[in-house]
């Protein structure tokens, strides 16, 4: 517990993310009587099961110094595959096929990015459009629907008042990815290539392996998010889930991930997703139009980016002051040694 508190206090961006999340939640809890109820908490965690995964996927890619713009398209493709195959093959096998395809897409993207040494934004813009086309082709440009709704009923069943099988599974995924990123060599390599790529490559860290792992995790998380949405609603569309990229990006940056790479974490991704869910759920009670919801979400993102920028400027100034102070101390020490030598 002490190590956890030390980590939060040392990471200014994470501390700000926790404070911001707390403020958003308290604001709506004070102004909306039912916001603190069990049903609203359950609804927030149900949304977290989707947005949390997308935020986690983007967080991992941004930590690696890249970004995956094909998140929404990958999720939509997986949703179409899973929904279309659930009736003839059963949900477990359909999920296995869909998640395998999404993960393989991520692996392929990571391999191409590392092999060609090209920025991910170039590759993923192409796969964004490509995967949309494939999803439309598989769905035959129609809305794919389930005929057996026992699976949607099961994954939305309440467990311990606040959770569902879907949200509990996502929480388990967060824990596993958090352990992987923090305590394994491969997770630390992802941080290394994002924070200081040239230095990491000079030190002998291969670019291909951490890049493939980062995009494989991104593809898996995107696919699982699409699976959850598809099975919960019982429908899927080739052009659906386009909003996930923007919402996931906001969640990732609100969670404290650095746009420069090499900084961020699973805890921050969870906090960022919850903050966005608090905001969106609270705004529902005000019956605002969609563009107002997007406006407030954008304001939230701007606040976080401004804070991160000011924090980096402050840190650089403090580091410069510390360096100048060290130089002055060394200069003073050398002058004293010179005086004492002359005095002899």
Image (tube, rainbow, N blue to C red):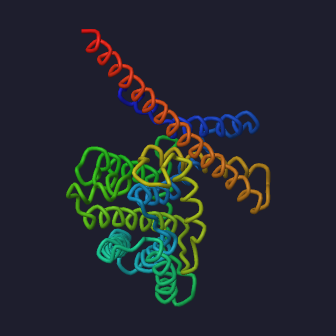
Q: Is residue 251 visible?
A: yes
Residue depicted at x 76% and y 62% = 291
Q: Position of residue 137 (x, y in %)?
A: 49, 89
Nearer the observer, 152 or 62? 62
Q: How many marks?
A: 0
Residue 98 visible at all: no
Position above or below: 321 against 217: above
Q: Is residue 264 left or right of residue 38?
A: left
Q: Quadrant of residue 326?
A: top left
Residue most toward the top? 344
Quadrant (top left, top right, bottom left, bottom right) of the N terminus:
top left
Residue 331 drawn at (x, y percent): 38, 25
Q: In the current view of this chain or complex, which residue is farthest to the left?
A: 204
- 191 in relation to 133, above or below: above
The image shows residue 56 at horizontal and vertical percentages of 45, 55
Q: Is residue 272 left or right of residue 336?
A: right
Q: Nearer the viewer, residue 109 or 221?
A: 109
Spot occupied by residue 228 in the image (x, y as percentages of width and height): 47, 63
Task: Residue at 38% x, 58% y: name it.
Answer: 64
330 horizontally vs 41: left or right: left
Residue 17 location, quadrant: top right
Question: Would you place residue 268 above or below residue 291 in this image?
Answer: above
- The residue at 35%/20% (across/down) is 335
Q: Is residue 197 left or right of residue 288?
A: left
Camera-side residue: 307 or 133?
A: 307
Q: Quadrant of the C terminus?
A: top left
């Amino acid at each position: 517990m002490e190590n956890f508190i030390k980590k939060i206090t040392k990471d200014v961006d994470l501390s700000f993310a926790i404070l911001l999340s707390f403020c958003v939640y308290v604001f709506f809890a004070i102004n909306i009587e039912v916001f603190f109820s069990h049903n609203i908490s359950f609804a927030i965690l149900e949304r977290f099961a989707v947005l949390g995964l997308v935020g986690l996927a983007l967080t991992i890619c941004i930590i690696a110094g890249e970004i995956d713009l094909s998140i929404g398209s990958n999720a939509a493709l997986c949703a179409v595959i899973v929904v279309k195959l659930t009736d003839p093959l059963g949900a477990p096998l359909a999920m296995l096929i869909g998640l395998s395809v999404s993960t393989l897409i991520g692996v392929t993207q990571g391999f191409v990015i590392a092999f060609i040494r090209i920025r991910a934004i170039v590759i993923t813009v192409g796969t964004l459009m490509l995967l949309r086309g494939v999803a439309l082709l598989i769905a035959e440009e129609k809305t794919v629907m389930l005929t057996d709704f026992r699976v949607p009923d099961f994954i939305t069943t309440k467990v311990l008042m606040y959770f569902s099988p879907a949200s509990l599974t996502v929480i388990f995924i967060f824990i596993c990815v958090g352990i992987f990123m923090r305590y394994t060599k491969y997770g630390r390599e992802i941080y290394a290539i994002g924070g200081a790529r040239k230095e990491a490559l000079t030190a002998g860290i291969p670019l291909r392996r951490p890049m493939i792992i980062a995009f494989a995790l991104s593809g898996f998380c995107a696919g699982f998010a699409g699976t959850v949405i598809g099975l919960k609603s019982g429908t899927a569309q080739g052009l659906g889930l386009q909003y996930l990229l923007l919402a996931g990006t906001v969640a990732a940056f609100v969670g404290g991930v650095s746009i420069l790479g090499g900084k961020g974490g699973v805890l921050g991704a969870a906090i960022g997703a919850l903050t966005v869910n608090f905001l969106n759920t609270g705004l529902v009670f005000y019956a605002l139009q969609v563009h107002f919801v997007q406006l407030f979400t954008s304001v939230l993102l701007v606040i976080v980016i401004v804070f991160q920028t000011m924090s980096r400027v402050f840190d650089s100034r403090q580091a410069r002051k510390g360096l100048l102070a060290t130089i002055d101390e060394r200069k003073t020490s050398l002058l004293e040694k010179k005086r004492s030598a002359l005095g002899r």
